[in-house]
Amino acid sequence: MRKKAMVKMLLMLLVTALVALTGCGGSDAKPAEETAEAEESAEAAEPESEEPAEETEEAEADTGDAERGYQFVFTTTDTEGNEVTSEELFGAHAYTAINFWASWCPPCVGELPELAEMAGRFNDKDCAIVGVLLDGNEEQGLADGKDLMADAGVEYQNLLPWPEVGSLGITAVPTTVFVDREGYLVGNPVIGAAPEQYEQTIDALLAGEL
């Protein structure tokens, strides 16, 4: 019984930690239901050893390595209706941080003022930050997003999602990734609102540490 209670407590802590780290889940996310399911799973089965946890960590590492080297190639429009190609966009800077966000996500909206300030510092380093408004293809999402950016003083370019965005595996927003001049993924993605980590990653890339 002690072992059963411990497993249940660990699973509850894991769910809490995941919610804190990822900010907003997708539009279909239901945190309360997921927590209940996790509790039911803890009561239904007890792991026989620690081997499954080790296998999970290894799988996550493999997934991260697989994402490295992906090249963004696309043509889309920005929130002002201007056509944008990935080649022109990324070729203008040594590194670019791509911030995937949505107008309905409080952590995304909360970090916009900091990102607006950060954009100027990035420009001085021959780097840039670009937003991708994931609900920007919806009329209401685009209108809300533009209002939020105006309120936060955002002047850096924000794009509408292109068809391939859905296959990138983004399950939480904000998610921020980093690319070089050729649009190849570099560094590590940051899930959740963490502007200081975006700048730390850019500085590490410039210093050749990543």
Image (cartoon, rainbow, N blue to C red):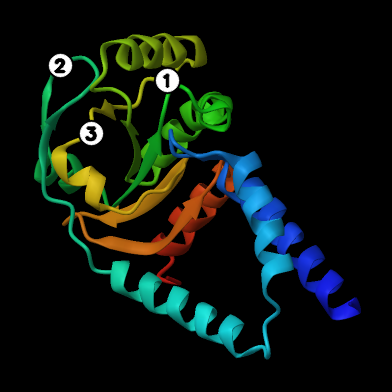
Q: CA distance from mark 2 to mark 3?
A: 12 Å
User: Is residue 41 found left or right of 155 in the rendered image?
Assistant: right
Residue at the image point whose x is 58% and y is 44% from the top: 194
- Give residue 186's position: percent from left, percent from top: 33, 63
Toward which corner of the image does residue 193 lie, by quadrant?
A: top right
Q: Which residue is pictured at 51% across the width and 48% down the height? A: 199
What numbered label is drawn on residue 174? none
Real-space CA distance between mark 1 and mark 2, rounded to the nearest whole angstrom? 16 Å
Alpha-carbon span between mark 3 and mark 1: 18 Å
- Image coordinates of residue 11 in percent, x first then y, are 71, 64
* Amino acid at dot 2: Gly
Q: Earlier in the sequence, mark 2 or mark 3?
A: 2
> In the image, is 82 to the left or to the right of 114?
left
Residue drawn at x 20%, y 54% is 181
Location of mark 1 (residue):
154
Closest to the observer: 183 or 56? 56
Ranked by sequence position, the earlier of labels 1 and 2 is 2
Residue found 52% across the figure and 78% down from its top:
56
Evaluate if marks 1 and 2 touch, with contact meaning CB atoms under 8 Å apart: no
> Of callouts 3 and 1, which one flags the residue occurring earlier in the amino acid sequence?
1
Please tell me how crowded label 2 is: few (under 14), some (14-19), or many (20+) other residues with Cα within 10 Å. Answer: few
Foreground residue, 92 or 132? 132
Q: Secondary structure at mark 2?
A: loop
Q: Which residue is mark 2?
A: 81
